[in-house]
Amino acid sequence: CPEGKENNLLRLGQPTTWVHAHAHSVEGVLDGICAGRTCISAFPDGPRLDLAATSVSSQAIMGGTLDISAGQPVEVAVSVMNGAGYRLHVVADGTVVEQRPVDETPLVERFSVTASTYIRCELVGDMFRGQLPPDIPDDIDRRDWRWGLSNPIYLEPVDKGEHLLSK
């Protein structure tokens, strides 16, 4: 985590949920939440992620579903805002498959990822002692905290039943 973010934890608006809304209205925000078009940052001016993916046959954003053929790589675009000083992790099916330091933002990173169930991303960094309230124990592990999380893009195999038909 970048230095200078003193005492940012445990305050109003933490964490902060960001919503892709198609309209600036209560209905638009609720539709975005229901569709899973959200990401979370540790604090209101904290790092933020946006995730999109493309396969041969479809496109999707966070919360959406992408049609894929088994073993087909997915082209992933991750937009990072306010993320300088963190590490970007791309997670596929529960495993970190790509990671890069974020030196400046805004930034768009592109990856080719093979997965079968989902893809998501996160921003990871250490916690500085000055960011914690004074009554937190000194022995708390301050390594590798998650400062930003995207919702996943779910993957739907388009050929999942074909092997049964060929028998």
Image: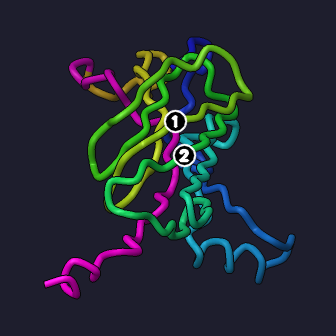
**Image point 54% across, 46% down: which residue?**
75
**Image point 43% across, 29% down: which residue?**
124
Q: Would residue 67 be counted in the magenta stretch? A: no
The one of 135 and 20 positioned closer to us in this rendering: 20
Give residue 111's mark: 1
Q: Is residue 31 above or below residue 145?
A: below
Q: Indicate the secondary structure of the residue bearing disc 2.
A: strand
Q: Say if mark 1 contacts mark 2, CB within 8 Å.
A: yes
- Classed neighbour count for the residue bearing mark 1: other residues with Cα under 10 Å, few (<14), some (14–19), many (≥20): some
Q: Amino acid at mark 1?
A: Phe
Give residue 75's mark: 2
Q: Is residue 94 above or below residue 56?
A: above
The one of 10 and 112 positioned closer to us in this rendering: 112
Q: How is the image coloured?
A: rainbow
Nearest to N terminus: mark 1 or mark 2: 2
Image position of 73 (left or right of 43): left
Q: Position of residue 157 (x, y in %)?
A: 37, 70
Image position of 39 (left or right of 146): right
Q: Would residue 157 be counted in the magenta stretch? A: yes
**Image point 70% across, 37% down: which residue?**
45
Q: Quadrant of the C terminus?
A: bottom left
Image position of 117 (left or right of 151): left
**Image point 38% across, 31% down: which residue?**
145
Q: Amino acid at mark 2?
A: Glu
Considering every residue shown, the one lying at the far bottom of the view is 165
Q: Which residues are magenta?
A: 138-167
